[in-house]
Image (tube, coloured by chain):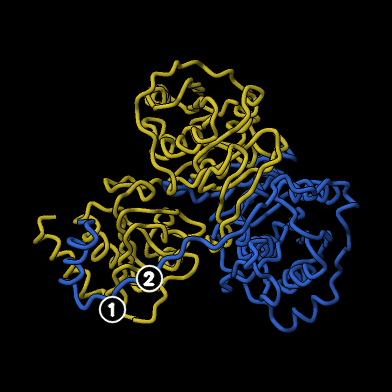
Amino acid sequence: MKVLVPVKRVVDYNVKVRVKSDGTGVELANVKMSMNPFDEIAVEEALRLKEAGKATEVVVVSIGPAQASETIRTALAMGADRGILVKAEGNVEPLAVAKILKAVVDAEQPGLVILGKQAIDDDSNQTGQMLAALLGWSQATFASKLEVEGSDFKVTREVDGGLQTIKLKGPAIVTTDLRLNEPRYASLPNIMKAKKKPIDDKSVADYGVDVTPRLEVLKTAEPAGRKAGVKVKDVAELVNKLKTEAGVL
Amino acid sequence: MTTLLIAEHDHETLKDSTNKALTAASQLGGDVHVLVAGGGQGTKAAAEAAAKLAGVTKVLVAEGPAYEHDLAEPLAALIVALAPNYDAFVAPATSRFKNVMPRVAALLDVMQVSEIIKVVAPDTYERPIYAGNAIQTVKSKDAKKVITVRTSTFAAAGEGGSAAIENAASAADPGLSSFVGEEVAKSDRPELTSAKIIVSGGRAMQSRENFAKYIEPLADKLGAGVGASRAAVDAGYAPNDWQVGQTGKVVAPELYVAVGISGAIQHLAGMKDSKVIVAINKDEDAPIFQVADYGLVADLYQAVPELTEALGKLGK
């Protein structure tokens, strides 16, 4: 079984983004970029399937600017076999990403696609579900456990009330939650080896997908700020303030 | 314009998140119909509750085994089957609808607007990006709108309606997935997303036992829900459904008490809209103090039992 893992290049999770003063977006110049953390978990899970003999090949795909090839290299250094870069400029919305991924799936014929549940830049949480819809495949979002059963899958999902386990008919879409695994660090020899692994260069035009945004961004603004309050000296003062000043007790 | 609001319920009672999403749905300006899809007898009771909500003009009920376990494929198929009659589809951003609504959107060839926090105009909304560190105003150019609602920012709609209840035309179950089992904790405590007070613990709790020994008695004294930071959940000190943050639950209670939580960006994203924030942490430089209204620099193992006792004396 081939496993396809889409990965996104995003602002590193440790960076506190700043909104541009003209309200046209957030400041991305000279900001550290990394692989979306949920996608790292997806790559790791695919590699574990391969190491357990359940997957034969792990292919990573990224849609974005030329620099997204660095994100693919990161996945290759972790152990993925090969990459596909679909070059696209500007903001590509989840629906358009899902359409491009559908075309990639049609060409690659994987038995499983593992994606991060959401990208930490736009926080949309849509692409996996949309891809499942476009392919007419089964889906299991927010996975904390994944088992292969022949060409089918058993997935435990993190839901509002606790955990839910479902069975998926393969081929299937799985999106990762935080507790699925802890991604490995790439070792130096593997980073060197990754430089020789192939990355296929494609463009959006190769797939004939219209990526015109459906959502027009009118403005990007700072959220309402919150000021630091006061430090209290002990529990008695805290209770007193909550009772008399805040009125929440 | 007619909006279809898809109801959140537990197959017995309607959830508060439905009332909150209804407020957003009503602000789109058209008629609001509610779809209650579920398995078993309780679905009807939830539908009757939905029919009483102010501003609802019709309730559609779909009852069947395919809707019993919140599987994405049959519920998405049902909503798409109803789509020709509607201009907008609104659901609360609970785990069920985060799962289902993008599938609906793609089948309708619509770009979903996730987790809106404000309706600016019927086609224009505000939504947080980058863990709430920026707020984007977006205008949807799609003919139909698919929207999930961050319920912590909308007031709950009340009762006062008397809508007709009809059976929804059924849709075929694609049969792609099936339910195996679930682990759902039963608790008498209020749910995180509707609790007026929340007490959360972080990595400094050190163990599940300490959550039970320190956090839970304080929460019970306050009649509060119990939350946790990602670090505490990752370490196994608390179950996943307690996680508050960017990718967990987003809450905005009257009072949020953060115990032993340093205040990573990802955690702040889930609670910084709380009305009053209290932080108890022994590290006086912890970022949580930058958003806390009341900060107490102290060892939680002393301060929390003291606080629990002091509240007891207040008659809590």
Residue designated by label 2: B261
The reply, left or right, for residue A104 in relation to residue B257 is: right
> Chain letter for yellow?
B
Tint of chain A: blue
- State the image quarter where residue B267 is shown: bottom left
Q: Are marks 1 and 2 in contact (CB under 8 Å)?
A: no
In the rendered image, which quarter is residue A7 located in?
bottom right
* Residue at the image position 49 percent from the left and 51 percent from the top: A158
Q: Is residue B95 left or right of residue A102?
A: left
Instruction: Please say if B159 is above or below B148.
Output: above
- Residue B184 placed where, x, y %? 39, 45
Pick the residue in front: A26 or A173.
Answer: A26
Name the mark on residue B297. Answer: 1
The kind of secondary structure element at disc 1 is: strand
x then y, percent, for residue B148: 55, 42
Chain that bears disc 2: B
The image shows a total of numbered marks equal to 2
